[in-house]
Image (cartoon, helix red, strand yellow):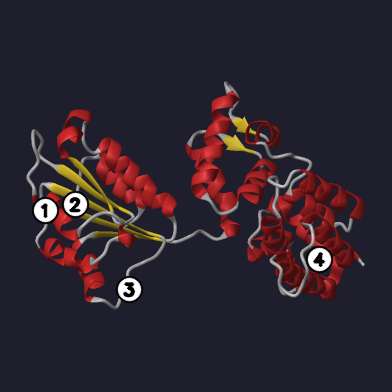
Amino acid sequence: MSVEKILGEWKKKIYKPIYWLEGEEDYYIDQLVDYAEAHILTESEASFNLTIFYGRDAAWADIINACRKYPMFSDKQVVILKEAQQLREMDKLEAYFNLPLSSTIFIVAYKEKKLDARTKFAKLVKERAEFLSTKKIYDSALPEWVNTYVTRLEYTISPKATMLLVDHIGNDLARIENEIQKILINLKTRKTITEEDVENFVGISKDFNIFELQSAVAAKDLVKAVRVIRYFGDNPKAAPIQLVLPSLYAFFSKVFMIFGASGPEDAIARQIGVNGFFFKNYSQASHTYGYEGVEKVLLLLHQYNLRSIGINATRIEDEALLKEMVVKMMM
């Protein structure tokens, strides 16, 4: 099942006895668990009929006993097992999965990984429970996710504001959502999020950020690149090197893909997985560096990534390391 389908059924008060939520993307699991905890039962019902366990501290027998209780002053109870991946002897829940109580809504949040599909218990879970498996969305899909989320709230967001958020925060949907909500609170009557809003309310400089560094490197603008890197050095939390290097690598990996793509610009943009609004940056880099130049940049990024974690290198300040790298890129 999908998150949307499960939430849709819950809002219509359609419930199944067992829900198994697993996978690498915590955001969607938390979304369902938070809703179940706050909305399936009324406040008065929850005081008697909401039970929450944490895998690290829970015993499988206590969980089964809680699930087999009958609700008080309600026609249903909710039992939630959070951090289920830490529960010892998980397969002991098999007895309850084989014979669940119809008045119990049992929700299992098995985060960060998935059950081994080859095991007997995993097969039983898929057979008996409403099953949701989540995975991290690709970094290239983050801008679309941001736009879809903002649109669903009946707002719009500028392309540059989107990229500022995505490049700064990375693949953390919960944090992106929190930052967008922070911005919306401050918009008042406006309905569009701009890069100035991101700068003012999230604390990301619209002039000194990873996106601007990418643009400077793409254009071989050494003066601008060094200025941005110097800002990073003075503000280490703005863009740590562990965030800068993967972002540049992702950028130039897409630039490298251009050499194997064909068709008009919009078609190539789709092929390499970038927003058409920003394709000119990728196209400019492909022309400025050429095939061999982009290949060289990717090799340098790999080498400096190793150096940044102390492999084959003595310790050097991140700012100096980035400056040295971009100079070699543009030579």
Q: Nearer the viewer, residue 301 or 28?
A: 301
Quadrant hosting residue 130: bottom left
Query: What's under tag 1, amino acid-wise?
Result: Asn
Examine the rendered structure and indicate whether residue 46 appears above or below residue 65: above
**Can residue 92 be seen in this snapshot?**
yes
**Quarter that holds the N terminus:** bottom left
Question: Which numbered disc flags the more N-terminal residue, 1 or 3?
Answer: 1
Q: Which residue is mark 3?
A: 116
Query: What's under tag 4, amino acid-wise?
Result: Ser
> Cα distance, mark 1 to mark 4?
63 Å
Residue located at (73% from left, 39% from top):
205
Q: Nearer the viewer, residue 287 or 233?
A: 233
**Quarter that holds the C terminus:** bottom right
Check contact, mark 1 vs mark 3: CB within 8 A.
no
Q: Which residue is mark 1?
A: 65
Nearer the camera: disc 2 or disc 1:
1
Residue located at (71% from left, 72% from top):
311
